[in-house]
Image (spheres, rainbow, N blue to C red):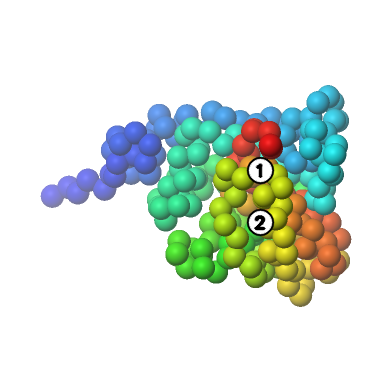
Amino acid sequence: MLFDLAEPCLLCGRRSPQGLCRLCAGELRDGGALYDPLCRCGLPGTEQGGLCGRCLRRPPPFTSTYCHWIYQFPLDRLINAYKHRGCLPAERALEPLLREQPLPWPDAEVLCPLPAHWRRRLARGFDQAERLALILARHWRRPVAPLLLRHRPTGHQQGLGRAERVRNLRHAFLARPGAQYRRILLIDDVMTTGTSARAASRALLEGGAKEVRVWALARTLQQER
């Protein structure tokens, strides 16, 4: 007897043994690419080598952001299933894309996931940024180190304005021992306004890090209020 090992595609429901059917995998690979972000925060700048309006007013503590995909369909559906519903098959569907990403910063000494608070991690069953960092670490041959502690729980950032986001994350992160004198690549799943990356990078630099850059799986293109 032959057994059908195929499961429904995570996006369209067609039967596929790979988590995504061939058509949806192609749409994921080809759609929503973000080419050559010019600004340090990962958004297109106003001109060649320019900065977005927010970074002109308030330069981020990190040096640059690397992100290849826009946070839109179909990637947003996979990330939401992975992050909010604990759908690990979505991680397997994303892994081929992650393995294609070149190490954007050869001088990076260590990958540091942007951590969730332990209560949120317990509710989800895992920390998605940590899992992404571990996949990238195998591909890039760089170590992963938990150099940040999220020692204060914060509410969801979605729907908050800039001032509310800043208040929400004030003193939320603390650098652990080991950040000193290191070039750190901060890993996150989605960058929306960059407020979390700013707060985490600031904590690492205050903890003695030499330089911090950010890698995100996806970037929203919305402008912050």
Callout 2 secondary element:
helix
Nearest the eye: 141 or 51: 51
Q: CA distance from mark 2 to mark 1?
A: 10 Å
* Disc number for residue 161: 1
Q: Amino acid at mark 1?
A: Gly
The quadrant in which residue 161 appears is top right
Q: Above or below — where is 159 with respect to 141? A: above
The residue at 60%/34% (across/down) is 70
| For residue 13, side relative to residue 128 (left or right) | left
x then y, percent, for residue 158: 57, 46
Callout 1 secondary element:
loop
| For residue 154, side relative to residue 3 (left or right) | right
Residue at numbered disc 2: 168
x then y, percent, for residue 117: 58, 65
Tally of marks: 2
Farthest bottom residue? 177
Nearest the eye: 177 or 123: 123
The residue at 72%/38% (across/down) is 42
Is residue 111 shown to the viewer in this render? no
The residue at 47%/29% (across/down) is 27
The residue at 45%/40% (across/down) is 77
Q: Above or below — where is 54 with respect to 176? A: above
Q: Amino acid at mark 2?
A: Asn
Is residue 91 shown to the viewer in this render? yes
Q: Mark 2 or mark 1, which has the lower sequence index?
A: 1
Dot 1 alpha-carbon crowd within 10 angstroms: few under 14, some 14 to 19, many 20 or more:
few
